[in-house]
Image: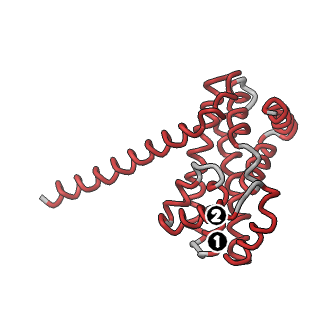
């Protein structure tokens, strides 16, 4: 199964180049069963073979994430929570989604607010669905775009970079992606805490 998907993704990328990557990642965001854990490491592997630029791959994949997230944000904004829930209950099985998946994304957004949009990009399924409650809760579009872009760039860069580093063994990333997301979250948390601590320390020095 993985070999077939890898061959298909490779064919799309080699035929369409960076726009192909953008389209694949956008589809992965709208249709979660398409695995980013295959698309992104494979793009990294091809980058390591000097077929692509890492910087342009990161831009193309982050743009794809942003497009897919905007589609779901627009759906949530346009039709509202009740109709979204009804659609997921009726047709969600076609995308391997359950009402519980949407509820989890809603709870995540309601509990953490803007932080949920950023960190939600690091979790399968939630990565896509968190854009929907952001839409029907009417999160400011500028804030949504900024947080989605940042979280997507972080996650995409991590998977593409690992695919590059692992070379022909890029496919093993799928087995360890669960651990990877927690490593990325830990790094982000560390950087945030460090930033806050440095700001507080600077204020104390200035105040004294």
Check contact, mark 1 vs mark 2: CB within 8 A.
yes
The one of 161 and 92 positioned closer to us in this rendering: 92
Residue occupying the point 81% across, 39% down: 17
Horizontal side, residue 10 vs residue 29: left or right: right
Q: Is residue 106 above or below residue 184?
A: below
User: On the image, numbered disc 2 is attached to which residue?
Assistant: 131
Disc 1 secondary structure class = helix
- The residue at the point 59 percent across, 49 percent down is 123
Residue 57 x %, y %: 69, 39
Residue name at image x 71 percent, y 21 percent: 168
Per the image, the residue denoted by label 1 is: 135
Rendering coords of residue 151 (x, y %): 56, 52
- Above-or-below relation of 178 to 86: above
Q: Quadrant of the N terminus?
A: top right
Answer above or below: position of 126 versus 18: below
Disc 2: CA contacts within 10 A as few (<14), some (14-19) or many (>=20): many
> Dot 1: few (<14), some (14–19), or many (≥20) neighbours within 10 Å?
many
Residue 75 x/y as whole percent: 73, 70
């Amino acid at each position: 199964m993985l070999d077939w998907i890898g061959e298909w993704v490779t064919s799309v990328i080699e035929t369409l180049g960076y726009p192909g990557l953008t389209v694949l990642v956008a589809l992965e965001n709208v249709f979660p069963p398409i695995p980013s854990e295959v698309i992104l490491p494979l793009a990294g592997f091809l980058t390591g073979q000097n077929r692509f630029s890492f910087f342009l791959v990161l831009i193309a994949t982050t743009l794809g994430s942003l497009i897919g997230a905007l589609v779901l944000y627009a759906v949530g904004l346009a039709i509202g929570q009740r109709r979204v829930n009804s659609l997921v209950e009726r047709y969600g099985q076609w995308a391997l989604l359950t009402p519980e998946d949407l509820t989890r994304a809603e709870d995540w957004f309601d509990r953490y607010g803007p932080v949920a949009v950023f960190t939600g990009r690091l979790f399968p399924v939630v990565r896509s669905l968190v854009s929907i409650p952001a839409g029907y809760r009417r999160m400011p579009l500028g804030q949504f775009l900024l947080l989605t872009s940042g979280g997507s760039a972080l996650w995409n860069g991590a998977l593409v970079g690992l695919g590059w580093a692992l070379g022909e063994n890029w496919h093993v990333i799928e087995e360890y992606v669960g651990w990877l997301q927690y490593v990325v979250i830990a790094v982000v948390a560390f950087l945030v805490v460090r930033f806050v601590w440095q700001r507080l320390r600077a204020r104390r020095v200035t105040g004294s």
